[in-house]
Image (cartoon, rainbow, N blue to C red):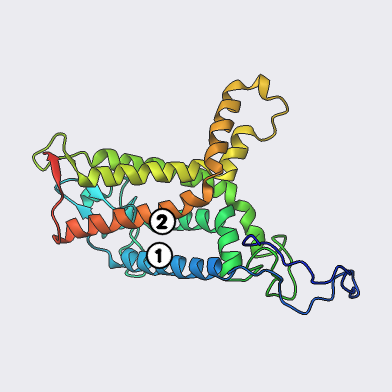
């Protein structure tokens, strides 16, 4: 039998029914595959990523490489008065408090954008909440009220966080362009540039693959033939949307790789591999 399918009863006779129309099945689920693997793996990976990123955000050092203008996305835009002035491309106005991240506004927005993301909802509903832990497996909770009440009704604000995430992706692009800098001035190119640009490309792919973006392009249109430009955009974004889960995980990886690389160069643990300048 293929993995993920349901066992058929040994007898051809239908099982007896409980009040309410449900079959009188004693087993928790008839699934025979390892359905626990996905939620457990999600908990482990997401928790590890969150712990690492929180530690990095509150380190408040090794986020900027002066020689090459490398700025880690975990500190962009750097708004705190504690930021290195050259790294604060859009001004410094946040107080330099240990409990306040240097890029607090952008981190809050991006956190909410991902927290309300359709894929991440599925991921943490199943893994952390067990609601449900897998297809064909009963919910671990006795009741379910959906996303119609507080606090889960706030999930409906995802479309608004998409707009701010779009702006922040543009900011990350700006940071990547500024990083083409050499210590003596002028154009420079190193391994860090490839890492920053690769991260930006993945961030744009994840942001644009958002279901809210797809709806923005093609939603509420009665006739695609009358809107050829939007139809073309909707078609391309729909292809990305099909990869939204993969892009969600891939961007977590590229963000971490980019941050760790810049931290290592900034701390002097490694030298940037320079091709020009």
Answer few, some or many: residues within 10 Å of disc 1's Cα (few below 14, many 20 plus, some between 14 and 19): some
**Residue 62 vertical position relative to residue 98 in the rendered view, above or below:** above
Q: Position of residue 98 (x, y in %)?
A: 32, 70
Residue 213: x, y in percent? 56, 40
Query: Which element is circle 2 on?
Result: helix
Identify the residue shown where x is 29% and y is 42%: 176
| Residue 98 located left or right of residue 136 | left
Q: Confirm whether residue 89 shows in the render.
A: no
- 146 versus 271 height, above or below: below
Q: Which residue is tagged 2?
A: 252
Q: Distance from label 1 to label 2 (Cα)?
A: 8 Å
Query: In the picture, which quadrant includes the N terminus?
Result: bottom right
Please provide percent x and percent y for residue 92.
30, 52
Residue at image mark 1: 49
Residue placed at 29% from the left, 46% from the top? 196
Judge by depth and name the residue closer to the eye, 19 or 2. 2
First reached walking from the N terminus: tag 1 or tag 2: 1
């Amino acid at each position: 039998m293929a993995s993920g399918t349901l066992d058929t009863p040994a007898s051809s006779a239908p099982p007896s029914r409980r009040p309410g129309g449900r079959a009188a099945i004693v087993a928790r689920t008839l699934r025979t595959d390892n359905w626990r693997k996905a939620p457990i793996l999600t908990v482990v990976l997401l928790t590890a990523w969150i712990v690492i990123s929180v530690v990095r955000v509150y380190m408040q050092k090794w986020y900027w490489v002066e020689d090459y203008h490398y700025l880690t996305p975990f500190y962009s835009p750097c708004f705190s008065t504690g930021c290195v002035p050259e790294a604060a491309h859009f001004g410094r106005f946040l107080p330099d408090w240990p409990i306040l991240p240097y890029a607090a506004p952008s981190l809050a927005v991006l956190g909410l954008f991902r927290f309300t993301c359709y894929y991440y909802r599925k991921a943490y509903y199943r893994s952390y909440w067990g609601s449900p832990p897998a297809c064909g497996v009963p919910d671990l909770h006795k009741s379910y009220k959906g996303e119609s009440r507080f606090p889960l009704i706030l999930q409906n604000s995802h479309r608004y966080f998409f707009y701010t995430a779009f702006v922040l992706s543009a900011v990350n692009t700006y940071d990547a362009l500024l990083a083409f800098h050499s210590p003596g001035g002028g154009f420079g190119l190193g391994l860090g540039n490839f890492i920053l640009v690769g991260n930006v490309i993945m961030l744009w792919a994840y942001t644009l693959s958002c279901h809210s973006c797809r709806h923005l392009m093609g939603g509420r249109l009665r006739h695609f033939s009358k809107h050829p430009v939007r139809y073309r955009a909707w078609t391309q974004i729909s292809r990305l949307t099909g990869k939204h889960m993969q892009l969600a995980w891939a961007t977590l990886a590229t963000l971490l790789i980019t941050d760790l690389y810049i931290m290592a160069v900034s701390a002097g643990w490694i030298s940037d591999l320079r091709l020009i300048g």
